[in-house]
Amino acid sequence: MAGKVRRIVAVSAGLTALVLVGISARTPITAVADDFPTPPTPGDIVSVEPLPVALSVPIDAGPFPAKAQRIVYRTTDAKDAPTTATGTVLSPIPPWRGSGERPLVSFAVGTHGIAPHCRTSELIQRPLTHYPPFDIATEYEAVFIGALLMQGIAVVVTDYIPSTYLITAAEGNAVIDAARAAQRLPDTGIPAHGPIAFWGYSQGGHAVAAAAEHVGSYAPELDLRGSYVGAPPVSQLNLFRYAEGGLSLGAGGFFLKSLISSYPEVETAVDEMLNDKGRQFLDTTSAQCVGGAMLSYGFQPSNSLTKDGRSMAQVLEADPRTAQVLAEMTLGRAGPTAPVMLVTGSNDDLVPPADNRQLARTWCDKGATVDLVDLPLPMVLPGSIIGHTVNSPIVGLTEGQRWLNDRFNGVPAPTTCS
């Protein structure tokens, strides 16, 4: 079990200064189809197109340190049915100066929203997206993506399968198959069988944790060196409980809409839970990015959206139709087959730190190599998600980058398991 915890304190980090230019809003491309003429192979590329990137980095190599292409690739959904997802393949201009072949990171972004205009392959084309009256979004993960590219590490960023927010199996498969697709894309400089890592924080951490647990059986051919798993929601029910009354209620709409989309058998249960305001909540948030959803529903109690006045977590847990599905989606059902850095912090006011610490113990007990990094920072404005978001740059731009490079360079992985 995990008997040790590695704690680090806040340090300043100045990696990758990204300069944003221009503002635009347009109808996004949605090249997703599920009608396959032949039996699909996960990771196969359905289509590819050049992608303009409205970001710049102050280096000699050019305005952005990578060639960008949007892909539609094949994957499987939560019920193992064939489907597709979109993603962005970023082939770096800087050389890889580490050991061996150029590595690839399959990057899973944090909460953006489930509307098409919230996808990374859309947001990366402009620094700011505005949908009236006040739905505003930007690709806030760009600094982390840029930091990887500057080191010569190739990156593929999945947009996820549409409407699969925190749907464990679907998110994990999307991350794994994005890596497969990037390695199959020609003329990118990405080795077809080179080293891979997974990276994600928050929703991205959940997706990467799911991928790390599943890759050994789903894609054993991949040379996975490790996974950076930042603050993953381990249990969707516990997330609802812990974040109750905070700024993030709108993200609950992303999840409920995704739950219905992935598991149609629970649609009646969700509909019976919600009052008229709750049904409007689903419709509104499904068309918003995370910023708009927070502005619309932040700091509202979830029981204002239910018919009987109980919180959403209470209703979902009490109803056997939803409780069973949620139990099956909980992380920790399998152990990662490659080393993991798992990040949490005592100041996290969105994702329960206790769940992450227990996940580390569970993974250790299953034989995984886990490096648990626990930030002992004070709680600041609980419910504002400041405590959740501050952990990401503190670890991601320092310890996380070093840990990742060590995995690619063949350094033995540290562990806090005992």
Image: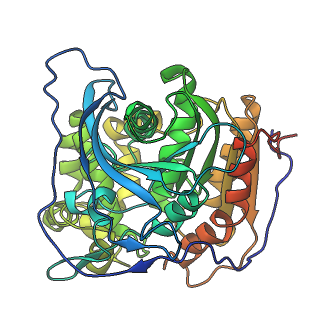
- Is residue 39 rendered to the left or right of residue 372? left
Q: Nearer the viewer, residue 339 or 58?
A: 58
Count of numbered badges drawn on the protein:
0
The residue depicted at 51 percent of the width and 48 percent of the height is: 154
Which colour scheme appears in the figure? rainbow
Where does residue 60 sit, x and y in percent of width and height?
Answer: 52, 71
Quadrant the N terminus occupies: top right
Name the foreground residue: 157 vs 108.
Answer: 157
Left or right: residue 237 versus residue 101 is left
Above or below 208: residue 396: below
Residue 84 in view, yes or no: yes
Residue 152, position as x, y percentages in the image: 58, 53
- Residue farthest to the front, as pictured: 60
Q: Residue 110 appears at what percent x and percent y?
A: 44, 60
Q: Nearer the viewer, residue 297 or 211?
A: 211
Which image quadrant is residue 34 in? top left
Q: Place residue 380 in its image quadrant.
A: bottom right
- Residue 233 seen by the camera: no
Quarter of the C terminus within the rendering: top right
**Does 404 sit above or below residue 337?**
below
Tell me what residue is drawn at x 56 percent, y 57 percent: 94
Q: Is residue 127 above or below residue 149?
A: below
Residue 260 in the figure: left or right of residue 227: left
- Please, which residue is most extreme toward the top here? 39
* Residue drawn where x is 57% and y is 36% of the image: 212
The image position of residue 379, as x and y in percent, is 65, 79
Residue drawn 72% across the image and 43% down it? 407
